[in-house]
Image: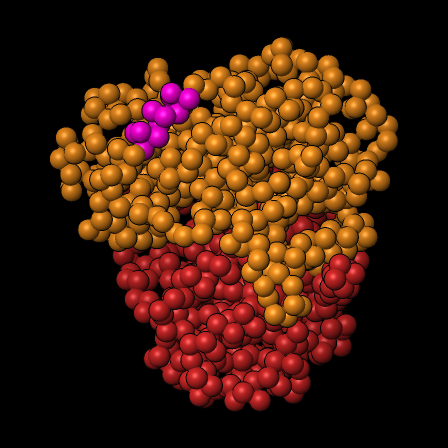
Chain colours: A red, B orange
Amino acid sequence: MTDWIRLDSTLALPHVDPKQFFANEKRIPKLHQALHQKTLPGNEFLGWLELPEKTDPAKVQGIVDLADDLRSCSECFLHLGIGGSYLGSRSAIEFYQAFQPKTAHTLTIHYAGIDLSPASYYRLFQSLEDREICLNVISKSGSTLETSVAFQLCLDYMKKRYSAKELKKRIVVTTDPERGALLHLAKEAGYRTLPVNPDIGGRYSVLTAVGLFPMAMMGLPVQTLLDGARLAQENLLKPSNPANAYALIQQSLPSHKIMIEALASFEPALDYFTEWWKQLFGESLGKEGKGLFPAGIHYSTDLHSLGQYLQEGRRTILETFLTIDSLPKHLSQLSQPVTNTTLTKLNEQAWKATMAAHSDGGLPCLSLQMRDTTLFTLGYLYYFMMKACAMSGYLLGVNPFNQPGVEKYKSYMRNQQ
Amino acid sequence: MTDWIRLDSTLALPHVDPKQFFANEKRIPKLHQALHQKTLPGNEFLGWLELPEKTDPAKVQGIVDLADDLRSCSECFLHLGIGGSYLGSRSAIEFYQAFQPKTAHTLTIHYAGIDLSPASYYRLFQSLEDREICLNVISKSGSTLETSVAFQLCLDYMKKRYSAKELKKRIVVTTDPERGALLHLAKEAGYRTLPVNPDIGGRYSVLTAVGLFPMAMMGLPVQTLLDGARLAQENLLKPSNPANAYALIQQSLPSHKIMIEALASFEPALDYFTEWWKQLFGESLGKEGKGLFPAGIHYSTDLHSLGQYLQEGRRTILETFLTIDSLPKHLSQLSQPVTNTTLTKLNEQAWKATMAAHSDGGLPCLSLQMRDTTLFTLGYLYYFMMKACAMSGYLLGVNPFNQPGVEKYKSYMRNQQ
């Protein structure tokens, strides 16, 4: 039977350092056990580990109902959040929408708070004119600079157009349920709130209200995502599993040679998944002078841009191909006249040819194949990656759940002011 | 007087290998002279070097007139091209549009031929329904797979809606003026053509008809871009210039430590410029097992994603910050209530704080500052980068104008079929 995520490491194994590989392989059972027994550094942030199983379907339905309520009075949905409060939901929304036969969006989503560019805000407010608006602001601490700026600007704008009573219908605040400036503000104004789980970090929060509410706003059947994640939770319970096998390869390549992992896909629907993956691995493993630098490769376009480098540049890259086995019927049969096959077949040929060429060019290549384009499989994939990332961090000897360097620029920021 | 592009290497110089730096510095005058005398490998592709000066304004006007003609009968503009036939024009169009006070687009641009995804094509043809269409297909050889597939699919679609006579008005083919399948097809069908300069490679072609025609379609004052490039050509004539200084830093960092160059910006308008830059440097220098891997960093969003890695991960990265000194008036005064300054000021503080933090974290950091958001400055920047890239390649000891590895996947592709 085909698994939901299939790992093929045939073209990477010849590149591993055998000593490191076998030593790491031996460490996995104990680390796996310790992860589940929550005895390793970062154990206060392991809420994601059993989340799929523990999530109450009634709570999920509550999120869906709240979304239905907001959507009923809106044409534009303002999503304010950055990093872990942004990439999870966006990656699912873009993936889902790409494979729908009809664009049934009655709602347009606008992402704000992801930059401080005057041009972005100028354009945003231009596009909101005369449209009915609702808003979800997401920040655990409530003090993230970019999110605060976005929220103040959008709130000022909405206050000019709506009464205080009307704003209560249109604003949902996702934040720490116990404390913080954003919680305080929401309580004062009477905005509805959703909780940020205290035991789940931003980059592991895609399956919580942080990710699920914006997805529900855009009409995604979010329970399906959780169902897929739940199957992944079950399937990856034993130490010998594909997620740990992925982590094992990542941490067994000679570190003086391989410095970068590039996640490559041939499907634009996966572009934001790649961004989510970059944060997950970059922020979890990039510390103490360690970790592979996570890069995204978007084929076919990058074949004609980075293709030369990947074929013949410095051999510093693990290239991990993320592909999709089976497309929906309305897409799988589209033909193209140049080579007289379906587009699907041609795209698959391009993937296989690229992987073979780069492998022969001396790059270690991994293949991760998703079974299909359902949210069930995507949910499975999110969980798979989080589990792989945790093990990868433990093998590397870092705490995969903290981010001690993220706040550093903020202290320098104060010096600028 | 402020220069159009200002290089500040203060935070990178402490990281260079002094021996390598001084040796490279000595080599620059001769290499510079050899570049201009066209005596080095790749000299058959140096058409870009004197292009700004040699471009006949009447020919540019011809391109603009042709664009006006096509636009007059169209609502959707199909741009078919990949790599060097795509990133140049797209980077200019996105930059230009971001800073316009009003979105005056009467024309919507659709980029096709950049992937083989059935989902992309399905969505494309859905969005073209009932709209008036025109098309520009760009391929030097006329045989690029992705472009050929796109052209056949779009041509089949347009033939169902327009007569052969009407198609002659709506299709422009940019290709080799002497030979190739695409030229042949255009001649047979009577489509108008624009030439791809035989002595300019794709990634150096942004200032030729390849880049200028799509820009003119979208209403960009393309002569301004050329004027800026022409000033850059004049200003960078002497061996001691900022473009060569940029190349010198790139090639004087210890190669066993620094493997990656990340171009970082705080302005989404520069996202596609970053993609253009990645191709320029990746394809020019990534050969013979050499070259820095080019990555793009998009702040603020990546501060909350890759920020941790850049602050504390492996110290393998040269981070080059590309920023803009002065914004148009309608943007520069936008205020934000959180820190009670303008957004412009806050975004500048974020840049300076990030660079200071990453520098103190042990990364070599470079700063490249654009004077303003005009196409004049952008034209200057394109030329600056191409000149820097040529010198960087010569210092590295590779031919910066070939791409021997790009075609390799195609031979593997034939094995798949």
Q: Is residue A6 above or below residue B236?
A: below
Corner quadrant of residue A35: bottom right
Q: Is residue B60 above or below residue A379?
A: above
- In the image, residue B58 lies in the stretch drawn in magenta: yes
Left or right: residue A141 versus residue B230 is right
- Residue A401, horizontal then vertical, whole percent: 70, 69
Left or right: residue A286 versus residue A310 is right
- Residue A56, horizontal then vertical, whole percent: 50, 86
The residues colored magenta run: B57-67
Task: Please state, as top left, top right, bottom left or bottom right, where the C terminus of chain B lies in the image.
Answer: top left
Task: Please state, as top left, top right, bottom left or bottom right, where the N terminus of chain B lies in the image.
Answer: top right
Give me the residue at 77% from left, 55% from top: B357
- Residue A30, horizontal then vertical, whole percent: 74, 69
| Pick the front one: B132 or A353 | B132
- Residue B335, horizontal then vertical, whole percent: 58, 63
Give me the residue at 72% from left, 42% from top: B366
| Pick the front one: A317 or B369 | B369
The reply to whether residue B177 is in sight is yes
The reply to whether residue B414 is in sight is no
Give me the residue at 42% from left, 61% from top: A126
Farthest residue toward the right? B19
Q: Main secondary structure of the magenta part?
A: helix
- In the image, residue A403 lies in the stretch drawn in magenta: no
Left or right: residue B303 versus residue A209 is right
Q: Is residue A146 above or below residue A291?
A: below
Corner quadrant of residue A125: bottom left
| Image mark count | 0
